Amino acid sequence: MNTLFDLTGRTAVVTGGSRGVGLMAARGLLQAGAKVVISSRKADACRQACEELSDFGEVSAVPADLSTEDECRRLASEVALRHDALHILVNNAGATWGAPLAEFPASAWDKVLDLNLKSPFYLTRAFLPLLEKAADAADPARVINIGSIDGLSVPGMPTYAYSSSKAGLHHLTRVLAAELGPRAITCNAIAPGWFPSKMMAKTLEEHGEEFRARAPLGRVGEPDDIAGAVVYLGSRAASYVTGIVLPVDGGVTLTR
C-alpha cells in the first residue's frame, strides 16, 4: 500500500501547468515523486511556476502555444530531448469564452475548440512514441484529460463553445482509451467543478456563496482535491482503469 500511489521514477507532462488546475496537478505529481515538465504559453509564467513548484521536486518548463499542431509537436520533441520516456501526460491547457447566443462569435468557437479539444488529440498523438516507451501491461502509461462538469450537464452561463468542447473531450477520452489500451496506455478524464483559478476568479467572486450553497459538500474545490485525483489516475492504483470521466466537483452535478 505504501507504494501503490508512489510515482517515484516517473516522468509527467502537464500542459497549462503554470496556474489553476494545472498547477495543482503538477504539485501533486511532484509530491508523489514524479519528475514534471510543465508547459504554458508565457515564458514568464513558466519560470514563476517552476520557482513555486521547485520545493516539491524536480520540475522544468517548455513554453509553448498549444493552440497549433506545430507547437504540440515541438513540445513533444523538446521533452524527448530531456527524457527517454513519458509515463503521464496531463492535457490541461484550455480556454473559455462567454457571450449571449446572438452575439457569440465564430472566432470564439475556433479559439476554444482548437485548444480544448483539438490540442489534446494532437498532443496525445505527438507524445505516443514516448508514452509507448513507458508502457507496460501491468502498469500502463497514462493520458489524463482535464474536462469539466460543464461537459457533463448544462451550465448556467452562455459558454457554448467551452461546454461543447469539454463534452467532446470526454468522449474523445473514451475513443482514445479503446484505441490505446492494446498499446498499454490508459486514457481517463477528470471533470473538475468549481476551483479557484484565473479562469474562474470573476465567477467565484460574483457567485461563490451561491455555488457553495448548491454543492452537497458545501464548498468549492481545493488544490489537494485535484492533486489526489491526478495522482490516483497516474499511479499503479489505477492500472486497470481506463475510459472513465471522474467528476471532482463536491457533488455539484447531482444538483444541476
Image (cartoon, rainbow, N blue to C red):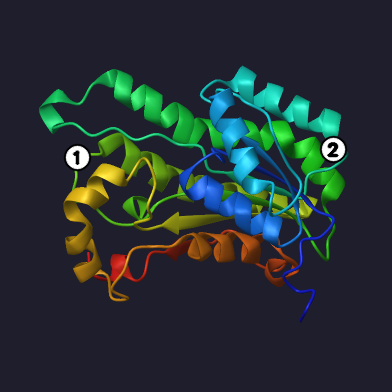
Q: Is residue 242 visible?
A: no
From the image, tell me which residue sits under label 2.
Answer: 83
Q: Is mark 2 on a helix, strand or loop?
A: loop
The residue positioned 31% from the left and 69% from the top of the image is 219
Residue 155 relative to residue 135: left or right: left
Residue 131 relative to residue 158: left or right: right
Q: How many marks?
A: 2
The residue positioned 44% from the left and 62% from the top of the image is 222
- Mark 2 / mark 1, whichever is N-terminal: 2
Viewer-proximal residue among 60 and 107 = 60
Q: Quadrant of the N terminus?
A: bottom right
Q: In this view, does 137 lie above or below 89?
A: below
**Outermost residue to the bottom:** 1
Viewer-proximal residue among 77 and 212 = 212
The residue positioned 73% from the left and 30% from the top of the image is 76
Q: Is residue 162 above or below residue 209?
A: above
Residue 176 relative to residue 34: left or right: left
The residue positioned 75% from the left and 74% from the top of the image is 4
From the image, tell me which residue sits under label 1.
Answer: 158
* Inter-mark Cα distance, 2 to 1: 42 Å
Neighbour tally class for label 2: few under 14, some 14-19, many 20 plus, Cα within 10 Å: few
Q: Is residue 218 above or below residue 85?
A: below
Q: Is residue 117 above or below residue 5?
A: above
Neighbour tally class for label 1: few under 14, some 14-19, many 20 plus, Cα within 10 Å: some
> Residue 199 location, x and y as percent?
35, 41
- Amino acid carrying label 1: it is Pro
> Residue 226 location, x and y as percent?
51, 60
Quadrant housing residue 193: bottom left
- Amino acid carrying label 2: it is His
Q: Which of marks 2 and 1 is in front?
A: 2
